[in-house]
Image: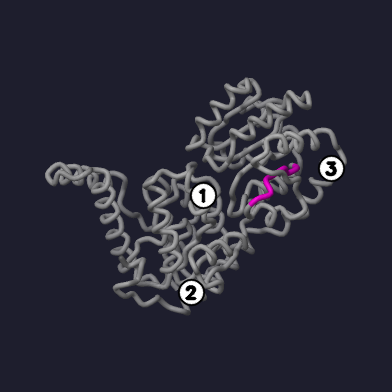
Amino acid sequence: MRIGVNTLPLFPGQIGGMETYTYNLLTHLTAIDRQHHYYLFVARYNRKLFETHCQRPNVSNVPTLSLQGLRYAERGAARLAGKAGRRLPRLSRWLVNAVASADMLYSIRRHRLDLWFCPLINLAPRHVQLPSVVSIPDLLPEFYPEFFWKDLLDWSRRRYPASCRGATKVITLSEFSRTSMVDRYGVAPEKIHVIPLAVGDEFYLPQDDVAIAAVKAKYAVPSEYAFYPANTWPHKNHATLLKALHLLRVKHGRRLSCVFTGVARGGHNALLKAAEEYDLAAQLRLLGYVEKYDMPLLYRGARFLIFPSLFEGFGIPVIEAMAADCPVLCSKVASLPEVAGDAALFFDPHDPEAIADAMNRILTDAELRQELVRAGRERSRQFSWERTARETLKVLEEAASIGARPRGPHHDSAR
């Protein structure tokens, strides 16, 4: 079977957990499956990410329109917009999407693909006449629409349900997300397959105090710190965490530093404002994007993972921390209780005092810390990328055996 994979939405260092998911899934999928051939549709901005994959005999890169080609399309849209008196952004996006879709459809036909796999939320291009599988981690726009710009919210509310309906099979990351799709979009439960994430082998390496000290020196982080790896999206709830750090200081007398990784996103200004309001600048380290092989050492050097997210379809930092023997403190919302099981100290993410109390408890209770490390190590072993890859392969083969859905004039994803 010839399987096409759409990686175009993957901008390295920009999309958080979905980059981890796509990279590791394809790494293990192409390693265990030598029966089928994988065609990775890549662009100039992400093709280097998959260079090692393409050294395998069952993997080929399919270059799509370069960024330069898209810029030419945008310039053409600008000229057309000027002549037609229409708004540039809407026409520009339409033209770029049309050109990119036509390019992909041509390559799909040229390589005679049997199955189309979109691991990054959106089933695209919309007119692909193949059995298809789409991965959708969660339905955040349905639960927190206030966190999205209008254009993005409108797009999400069109494309999420259309992708669910148009795909032959849907993969999601938790039972929570599966239930959300059934309830919100009316997707048949048997069409949705729950396949959890995992962590890389680097998180299971033995404790190395010298390497931990070197990474701390590299990033100039303090000797004792809480750790929160997350792009600053609004639902990641950074500002509430900062208020909790303030309460930890004034209520419990503990001045704890907090190290953040991840790129700046829509909630970044709220984080900076909270840091100023609570006089926390000296306690914070904002590292931005960090190389993946430094991440396990940052976890191991931390007192604990603090994860106050308001919403997760899975929450991979929880499992990463557990694998790295880092105690987990996290929100008791969405998929997180399902993923963390009994290996985390939970709190209400809307209540900064509850977060502060949880942090104080883990700092003062050595027995609790040891129990969370033990339970976390055991819990993390239940997740593996090989299992994720094998279960995904099973879904891909089932979708191919079903065949493409008939396309009619009323089919949502064909419009």
Question: In which image quadrant can residue 105 be found?
Answer: bottom left
Distance, label 1 to label 3, CA atoms, is 33 Å
Query: Residue at coordinates 26% horizontally, 55% vertically from top-left?
Result: 99
Query: Residue 19 — which label?
Result: 1
Q: Secondary structure at mark 1?
A: helix
Range shown magenta: 327-333
Query: Residue at coordinates 38% horizontally, 60% vertically from top-left?
Result: 124
Q: Tell me which label, 1 or 3, sits earlier in the chain.
A: 1
User: Which amino acid is tagged 2?
Assistant: Ala
Q: Position of residue 191 (x, y in %)?
A: 52, 72
Q: Nearer the viewer, residue 201 or 255?
A: 255
Q: Is residue 2 left or right of residue 95?
A: right
User: Which amino acid is tagged 1?
Assistant: Glu
Q: In the rendered structure, does residue 328 fall within the stretch colored magenta?
A: yes
Q: Is residue 315 left or right of residue 345?
A: left
Q: In the rendered structure, does residue 413 fall within the stretch colored magenta?
A: no
Query: Residue 368 — which label?
Result: 3
Q: Is residue 188 above or below residue 222?
A: below
Q: Residues within 10 Å of mark 2 (few under 14, many from 20)?
A: many
Residue for badge 2: 399
